[in-house]
């Protein structure tokens, strides 16, 4: 934390200003999502309400439980739940906190890292929660260095989760299992709650129930476009900070409504609208710039390959025997083996998964969003582009950040791309 004078004066001014800007940013994004699109599903109201935590309109109580903040999908949520704590992902999409994080990091740093750092420094967490532990996986070089800054950023302790650079070797798997077991012990020390066979089994099943509904949601989007992509992204974003049972029940109701829409042929767009797959750097609320533009300009986002969407919940824990010494390695495997994060090398599975998505969702074109300063996604874009080109799938590469200043330029490029896809569809017809 900063010294006392800064806490009492400049720090408080920074916090107050950033908080106001964050609320305005969230309100503006929600207004676009809710009011500027027709035919939103009625059951989306729950998720719109949940997103209002950024405006201070939603309240939450930890009810005396420890809060464990996570900074990546590699953190095993099942262990946090089994230890009696609340998992809470703090990856930020806010331009308001991006500007604060820029004070500590080089100008060309990833906006997601800067925004998350700004959130930590100013304690601008959703619900005003201050986490008891911040878990920081080593999934990129910029995140790795955050832990070294933690002493001057926050009083909440950082825990570094050492993710191996590859996931294909048996050595990497064994190493990761040891890392996960050490994390389990750290959680037990934090909460004073032993992770038992019964508690871990219950946590795995709790997350699995959420995954069942997510897979149902995922598959419903393969056919008739009955939900906007901006809504689908918001659904998965709210999983970051929702009670898991409440989120699962809300998604179950939404899935029921979408199935009824399919039965009634109740589309949100014309069948001629190009079907878009988004991939690359994740869209995290309130930074919904690209998906909103795509759909305002006549496209429909039917699938995303992001760590804030399909990578978040699709893959489940595969347990052979419900004993603690079997479940712990199974949980570890779920967060390593199927993951297509570009921090792993080689990462050929990501190419395969994207091509599968293209086929299953009848994709007309791919938009690859890369945050300026996010070297992993910037470097991998070439491999993805080449693979898509070989399979006859157009791709638009968009480099952006959290600033609204490039809206005009990006809008022009996306509009031209969508028009080219419409022309292509007409020729096929």
Image (cartoon, helix red, strand yellow):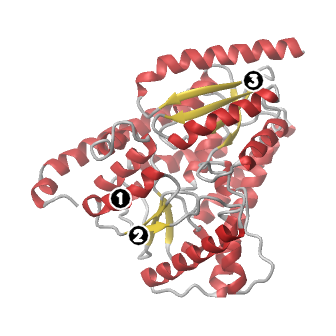
Which quadrant of the structure image shows residue 295? top right
x then y, percent, for residue 324 = 68, 86
Of mark 2 and mark 1, the one earlier in the sequence is 1
Q: Is residue 272 left or right of residue 337?
A: right
Q: Quadrant of the N terminus?
A: bottom left
**Disc number lying in front (2 or 1):** 2
Instruction: In this rendered view, identify the residue nearer to me: 237 or 4.
Output: 4
Q: Secondary structure at mark 2?
A: strand
Q: Quadrant of the C terminus?
A: top right
**Disc number lying in front (2 or 3):** 2
Residue that mark 2 sits on: 133
Is the C-beta separation of discs 2 and 3 under 8 Å? no
Q: Secondary structure at mark 3?
A: loop
Instruction: In this rendered view, identify the residue nearer to me: 262 or 209.
Output: 209
Distance between the alpha carbons at the discs numbered 2 and 1: 15 Å
Checking the image for residue 274, the label placed there is 3
Distance between the alpha carbons at the discs numbered 3 and 1: 41 Å
Residue that mark 1 sits on: 128
x then y, percent, for residue 114 = 38, 45
């Amino acid at each position: 934390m900063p010294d006392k004078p800064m806490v009492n004066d400049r720090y408080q001014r920074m916090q107050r200003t950033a908080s106001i800007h964050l609320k305005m940013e969230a309100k503006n994004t929600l207004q676009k999502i809710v009011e500027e699109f027709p035919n939103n599903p009625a059951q989306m109201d729950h998720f719109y309400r949940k997103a209002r935590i950024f405006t201070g309109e939603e309240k939450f109580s930890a009810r005396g439980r420890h809060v464990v903040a996570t900074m990546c999908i590699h953190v095993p949520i099942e262990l946090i739940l089994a230890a009696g704590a609340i998992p809470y992902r703090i990856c930020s999409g806010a331009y308001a906190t991006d500007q604060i994080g820029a004070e500590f990091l080089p100008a060309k740093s990833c906006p997601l890292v800067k925004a998350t750092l700004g959130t930590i420094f100013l304690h601008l967490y959703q619900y005003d929660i201050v986490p008891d532990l911040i878990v920081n996986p080593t999934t990129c070089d910029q995140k790795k260095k955050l832990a070294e800054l933690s002493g001057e950023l926050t009083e909440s302790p950082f825990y570094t989760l050492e993710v191996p650079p590859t996931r294909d070797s048996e050595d990497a798997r064994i190493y990761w299992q040891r890392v996960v077991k050490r994390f389990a012990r750290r959680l037990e020390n934090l909460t004073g709650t032993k992770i038992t066979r019964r508690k871990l089994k219950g946590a795995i099943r709790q997350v699995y129930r959420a995954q069942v509904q997510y897979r149902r949601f995922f598959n419903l989007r393969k056919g008739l476009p009955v939900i906007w992509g901006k809504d689908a992204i918001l659904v998965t974003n709210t999983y970051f900070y929702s009670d898991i049972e409440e989120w699962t029940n809300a998604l179950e109701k939404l899935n029921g409504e979408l199935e009824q829409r399919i039965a009634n042929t109740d589309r949100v767009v014309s069948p001629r609208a190009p079907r878009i797959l988004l991939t690359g750097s994740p869209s995290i609320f309130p930074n919904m710039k690209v998906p909103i533009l795509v759909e305002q300009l006549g496209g429909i986002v039917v699938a995303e390959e992001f760590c804030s969407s399909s990578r978040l919940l699709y893959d489940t824990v595969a347990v052979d025997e419900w004993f603690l010494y079997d479940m712990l390695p199974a949980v570890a495997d779920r967060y390593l083996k199927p993951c297509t994060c570009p921090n792993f090398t080689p990462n050929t599975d990501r190419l395969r998964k994207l091509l599968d998505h293209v086929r299953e969702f009848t994709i007309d074109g791919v938009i690859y969003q890369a945050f300026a300063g996010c070297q992993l996604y910037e470097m991998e874009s070439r491999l993805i582009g080449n693979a898509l080109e070989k399979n006859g799938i157009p791709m638009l590469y968009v480099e952006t950040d959290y600033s609204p200043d490039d809206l005009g330029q990006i809008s022009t490029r996306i509009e031209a791309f969508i028009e080219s896809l419409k022309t292509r569809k007409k020729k096929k017809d």
